[in-house]
Amino acid sequence: MRHAAVRRTTDPSRHRLHGRPQGLPRALVAGLLVLAATSACTSDPSGRAAPGRTPTTASPTVRPRPSAPQRTAVTHVAGTLAPRSRAVLARNVGRTLSAYADEAFLRVPYPHPGLAHAFGAFTERVRPQARRDSRLLTNAALARSTRAVRATHRTAYLSVLAPHGRVAGVTAAVDLVLLVDRGRKAGRRVHLAGRMLLTRTPSGRWAVFGYDLHRSERPVAARWSAS
Amino acid sequence: MTRLALGLLLVLLAVAMPPAAPRHADVTLVRVRTAQAVDHPASVLWVLCLGSDARPGERLTGTRADAIQLVGLNLRTGAGTMIGIPRDSYVEIRGHGRDKINASMFYGGPQLMADSVSRLVGVRPDYVFTTGFLGFRAMVRAIGGVTVHSRFAFSDPVRPQGYHVGANRLNPFQALIFGRVRHPLPRGDFDRSGNQQELLRSILREVRGHRSRPGFMEHGVLAAVRNLDTDLNPAQLYRLAQAVVSLRPERLRGCVVTGPTGYAGAASVVYPDVAQARRLGDDARRDGTLDHGCRQG
């Protein structure tokens, strides 16, 4: 199924990305550029370099910023769920969704040949189909030309089925905006949104057992990666 | 005048937009690609959907079944089959001799009902769902009503404007009556069974149309948990519901087992065309899809 859709740009970081920082003294800009050219870049907010990532040719960039953190909240409950349980659920489901975004887009050594571990947060039975959809669900389509990926927006609002006060299933309305730095090539803004369906596995962790997602991309001009 | 306006527009564009400069519009036209999948243990499911005629205070599975639909679902292709069985079908019920098929529910609950249906059609259901009048209405209420496409026009006091040929937006009570009436329909029980299939299709259409609305699926499944008699736990029911919603209503094909009517003693019965029922079962058993027509030779 394919759609053409008119979408209003809502990315608040867009204006910050384009062009050189205004009003900064030239010396400071030059200093930043030197720093950018000599330091390794990572989209990991912890600042750790991903294994296998190697610095490439230096070029003018703006200073890299860490990825936006995953924000997860319970917004609808069918049944009953205590406030404390809601917080625990949001944290645990957020962890699963974070793991997916990290493995599929963010904490990946670029450029790289594949995204073999992208679907570790999915149930075993849905993984084969997810692999077939990997051009939509991961950064596989852009991986070879990607230098780094940064999330500018990561939210998940949870609708919960909880009859008798016990969670039986969760639908996460996810919204993920990523900036893909492709070196000399034009960068891409990737928007992935839709529903991810989660169930609790026998081991107690939450896993994605279904998805209904749409993805759109558009070019962005500036580079933000410093590697 | 038009040419002048077009010329002006082109000039404006040429002046306003440097040819090589990156441009960021506030409104963009983008190609959106979609992907969807739902994991369920089986790729083909058979579900026996029963509408019990239990009155308030009666046990749901201890009375007769008014509506009997054997539904095959192919979760891989999104296609499905509904085989309607007239409730008056006169069949052999294991351990109880010949009787109307809906008496199986009274004699042995959903298990015996599943047994009688599978002996007739040759397909054993994986699940049996039973709901009553109140439960059905509660579930339709949970999804905000349904739109059915009726093949017949008929009247009923619950719907002052009547039921028209074509689309009818129904509230829960009107939906229940649509699946229950048979006297105004040309072929009585057979057409009623067809209407029940249209109701199932309309519920699927409604749920699919709203499934992205936050909380919609969860409230719908909660209504099902409260109003269905099933041995599935809520988590299993949730996964099944999410899988069923991936089906496409336009690919849900319905056939009704037919046969001559007559009397068994004083009771009005249908002598089901067992050969037809078996052909339908054989056709759809493996992939949940009917490749041939309802009569099949």
Image: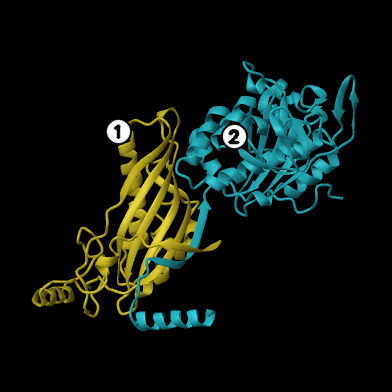
Chain colours: A yellow, B cyan
Seen as rendered, the residue at the extreme top is B57
* B226 or B172, nearer to the observer: B172
Q: What amino acid type should be assigned to the residue bearing mark 1?
A: Arg
Task: Tell me if residue B17 can be seen.
Answer: no
Which residue position is annotated with label 2? Answer: B140
Q: What amino acid type should be assigned to the residue bearing mark 2?
A: Val
| Within-10-Å neighbours for mark 1: few <14, some 14–19, many 20+ | few
- Which chain hosts label 2? B
Q: Residue at x 63, y 38 (%)?
A: B126
Give the x, y percent position of residue A131: 47, 61
CB-based contact (under 8 Å), mark 2 and mark 1: no
* B74 or B58, nearer to the observer: B58
Among the 4 quarters of the image, the one containing residue A26? bottom left
Which residue position is annotated with label 1? Answer: A84
Q: Residue at x 23, y 75 (%)?
A: A55
Task: Tell me if residue B83 can be seen.
Answer: yes
* B52 or B140, nearer to the observer: B140
Up-down relation of residue B105 to residue B140 (above or below)? above
Q: CA distance from mark 2 to mark 1?
A: 32 Å
Up-down relation of residue B52 to residue B162 (above or below)? above
Up-down relation of residue B265 to residue B222 (above or below)? above
